[in-house]
Image (cartoon, rainbow, N blue to C red):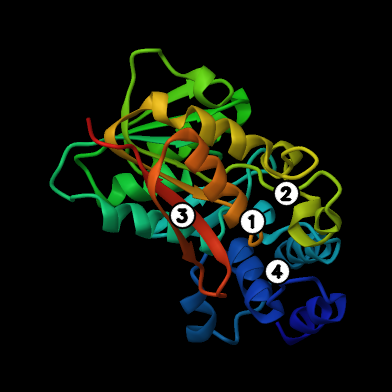
Amino acid sequence: MLQATQTLTDCRLPGSNPRLEAELLLCAILKRPRSYLAAWPEQTLTSVQEAAYQNLLQRRQCGEPIAYILGCQEFWTLSLHTTPEVLIPRPETELLVEIALQTQLANTALEVLDLGTGSGAIALALAQERPLWNLHVTDITPATLGIAIHNAKQHNILVNTYLGSWYAALPDHLRFDVILSNPPYIAAHDPHLMQGDLVWEPQQALVAGVDGLDALRTICLGCVKHLKPGGIILLEHGYDQAIAVRHLLQQAGIINIQTWQDLAGHERITGGYVQLD
């Protein structure tokens, strides 16, 4: 374990936690929880297990994200199947879930839309907390939508799925109380795309045109048509995009617009309401 930790430390991978990652990879080989490692520190690996462990370590040394190596990622209270077809769920996106839960009544049956659902993280977290809510999700690729469907089944959660690009995926008659999205919001030539986990993640889930706002424009400008009177839209965006998103929502006719900061103090979520009739 110490040698594996040192090996990963020497790689200096961005955002890496070498000790934790060495433990998680070992647990994957042993098919045991992390508590097992503390309870049985003298555990030795068979030659087959050692070879498999070294293979996983090598993949991580090459920069492959832990979530893709393990095939899962924790989000909210859920463990989600995660493959290179989907964006890796991130802790900052949990803020989007928190805000939605705080702004809506728990005992009310609501129609809720998650645009560009990816792994299904946002919708499934909300469904877990609000059983009365009726969740709808969209994504543009069959493989990605398949991951969301798989995760929903794994957690015995019912979601309505639609294949297609943003609002174009939806039946015309649907209107929602809540629309949420963590869309692509990175500019095409942003140097961060060549760093860390972003190198491995699907570009269509990251990049949104020259300025990173293409997806947000589409979502903002079409939201009023798809929201019920008094409905709310909540969007995750880049740390420097809050002003632009507020302007887009204002253009669309959204009122009471607000921006929330993430734990790092960055403006991360912006949203507002459709006016009541």
Question: Could you tell me how far apart the alpha carbons at marks 1 and 2 are, in whole angstroms?
Answer: 7 Å
Give the residue type at disc 4.
Thr
Residue position for label 2: 186
Give the residue type at disc 3.
Ser
Residue position for label 1: 238
Residue found at x 79% / y 76%:
8
Question: Could you tell me how far apart the alpha carbons at marks 2 and 3 are, in whole angstroms?
Answer: 26 Å
Marked residue nearer the N-terminal end (1 or 2): 2
Secondary structure state at the residue bearing disc 1? loop
Q: Quadrant of residue 241?
A: bottom right
Give the residue type at disc 1.
Gly
Nearer the camera: disc 1 or disc 4: 1
| In-front residue for pair 118/1 | 118
Marked residue nearer the N-terminal end (2 or 3): 3
Question: Could you tell me how far apart the alpha carbons at marks 1 and 4 are, in whole angstroms?
Answer: 46 Å
Q: Position of residue 58 (x, y in %)?
A: 83, 63
Secondary structure state at the residue bearing disc 4? loop
Q: In the rendered view, would you say 30 is above or below 78?
A: below
Residue found at x 49% / y 77%:
36
Give the residue type at disc 2.
Ile
Marked residue nearer the N-terminal end (4 or 3): 4
Residue position for label 4: 46
Residue position for label 3: 79
Q: Position of residue 176 (x, y in %)?
A: 32, 30
Nearer the camera: disc 2 or disc 4: 2
Q: Is residue 188 visible to the viewer in this orientation of the structure?
A: yes
| In-front residue for pair 135/62 | 135
Dot 3: within a 10 Å radius of its alpha carbon, few (fewer than 14), some, or many (20 or more) residues? some
Question: Could you tell me how far apart the alpha carbons at marks 2 and 4 are, in whole angstroms?
Answer: 45 Å
Secondary structure state at the residue bearing disc 3? strand
Question: Could you tell me how far apart the alpha carbons at marks 3 and 1 are, in whole angstroms?
Answer: 25 Å
Q: Position of residue 143 (x, y in %)?
A: 62, 28
